[in-house]
Image: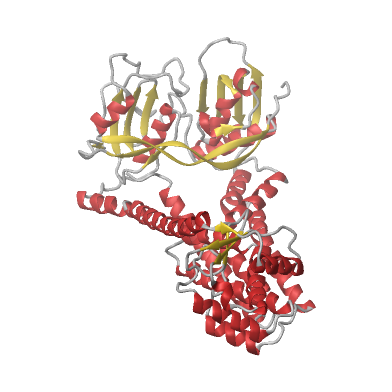
Amino acid sequence: MIPNNLSAIGTAMANHLWQSTLFAALVGVLTLALRKNRAQVRYRLWLAASVKFLIPFSLLISLGGHLARARGSISVQNGLYWAVEEVGQPFLTKTPPVVAPSASSLWNSHLLSLLPLALAVLWLCGFIAALALWWLRWQRVAGAVRAAVPALRGREVDALRQVEHIAGVSKPTPLLFTQDSLEPGIFGIVRPVLLWPVGISGHFGDAHLRAILAHEIWHVRRRDNLAAAMHMCVESIFWFHPLVWWLGTRLVEEREHACDEEVLQMANQPQVYAESILKTCEFCLESPLACVSGVTGSDLKKRIVRIMSEGAASSLDCRKKILLIAAGLVAVTAPVAFGLLHAGPNQSELQAGDTLAKLPLFEVASIKPSKSGEPGTRLMTSPDGFSASNAPLREVIRLAYQVQEFQMSGAPPWINSERYDIEAKVDSSAVEAFRQLDQEQHRLMLQRLLADRFQLKTHWETKELPIYALVIGKNGPKLHEAKPGDTYPGGIAGPDGVGRPGLMRMGPGGLTGQGLTMESIARLLSQQLGQTVTDKTGLRGLYDVNLHWTPDNGPLSMMGPDSKPTPDPSEPSLFTVIQEQLGLKLESQKGPVEVLVVDHVEKPSPN
């Protein structure tokens, strides 16, 4: 089956691609505005567009979100998972019965679900092929470097040192003579060397020789090989995007144009420099390699015409400098600002706050340290409020925010060790209104109580954690579809003694439920396994379950003294029961999990 996070990765990648494409388009507009200025400026802009493919805007947006959270945490959030059920209290699920999908629709859904995996495999094949191509090219030139002979003296060395002095390069570049028919070029990033074909110097006069050497030295000074290597990474990762290959052409063109401008500024005659490039082309039989900064790159005819006809490029005036600075600031600050705004109260949070304001208050809330010394914990919603006995604060928080043990972080140790008895009651005039509230509204009231009495402040973070995916087994599902009036031996019923959809009872080693959705079953399994279980079955019906297994040492739900059923050591494991009785399977994966971070909490003051 497919890893759970492939879909999320695909969505993030799509967002990153359109953002990077838009960024490159805006860079293209800027380069048009600067077409009469120095090529170095346009080169840097195109390089920024290339590097943008390696830096998602989401990083800057995340930074803005962290800055926003540093200003203050939101203490009331909607939970995403169930962790603690109201023990012994049947609850009503408001999901209406839905007709289960046919076998053909399940098969089509299964094939469609394989599409992200197929695309991932296709991308990996292209990525490996691109890397292999670059590696072969690199190895070819590296072999020529290993076979080359260092030049310690001579006409070429003297001219090279003279050019380095004029260009302001303090560290001498090694000159290596090679027997290969490669063009003169700079190879290497950290310790670049100049490969010089044996015999080419005889085609050059002294002025031609200095012009070619000057061109190569400017490649060293500008660190063009480092930039080329960065774009190689972009092309390898995003090999499927035509824009990155077009960007590579623009980078080579502006890189060579920028070096041409620097060579001409060193008092080299345009005619002599153009002749030196043509003589190099006559001597070399092959085109330049992408991993070497040579002299004959870009459109040769276009370069010669530009060298001979164009004068010195103009520098940036004040207006264009302001334009570039403003564009750079917008590119960096806009995502951060978006993160700041996005981290503020969103629509669902505003609705939650509005809902909370309309809910009744707990007029009386007694919170006392528990002195019973009993091992058990009981949490429940009564007709007129909420009560807890011998409960660690962590379990109350888990109930209020619908999180499991592994979904909490940042809390002090005392919320596990110190236990409390809590009695929270609404006013007598609000009892009827309280009874009409659903579970989510009850949890919002409990969150407000925790914020008032324990000064609890929290926020949510998304982390990559191990999860289980609940999928259909190879032999198909064996689920019992819920029917009106069905029940199990020793089953469950509502307060009126009548069974109905959504009723369940769960304890260590047992789960009995009627009319449960697959999402509900996944949440209940999450509670037993202490790890998020996501529903990947595609089933949308209501089902009856009656499972018994041998519990392990993993996390168990909070159960009161009347919890049922009692586990039987002879029962199989939970994983085996799911496969044999439900025809389903739990697959270990990794995926994004919402984690509740406790920013601040205090011990309650005495009543």
Q: In the image, residue 244 lies at what x, y percent?
A: 50, 67
Residue toward you, 570 or 567: 570
Picture quarter with the N terminus: top left
Q: Quadrant of residue 211?
A: bottom right
Point out the residue furthest to the right here: 318
- Residue at x 65% of width, y 43% of height: 74
On the question of residue 546 being in view, the answer is: no
Residue 367 in which image quadrant: top right
Q: How is the image coloured?
A: secondary structure
Instruction: Report whether residue 295 is seen.
Output: yes
Closer to the camera, 236 or 568? Answer: 236
Q: How many numbered callouts?
A: 0
Spot occupied by residue 123 in the image (x, y as percentages of width and height): 39, 56
Relative placement, left or right, of 424 versus 234 is right
Residue that appears at 43% across and 46% down: 5
The answer to which of 496 and 483 lies nearer the viewer is 483
Q: Residue furthest front?
A: 154
Residue 120 place in picture, x, y as percent: 38, 53
Q: Residue at x 64, y 68 (%)?
A: 156
Q: Position of residue 381 (x, y in %)?
A: 51, 29
User: Left or right: where does residue 354 sit relative to residue 527?
Assistant: right
Establish if 51 lies above or below 7: below
Residue located at (54% from left, 76% from top) = 280
Furthest toward the top, the residue is 373
Left or right: 375 in relation to 536: right
Above or below: residue 336 compared with residue 589: below
Q: Quadrant of the C terminus?
A: top right
Q: Nearer the viewer, residue 21 or 89?
A: 21
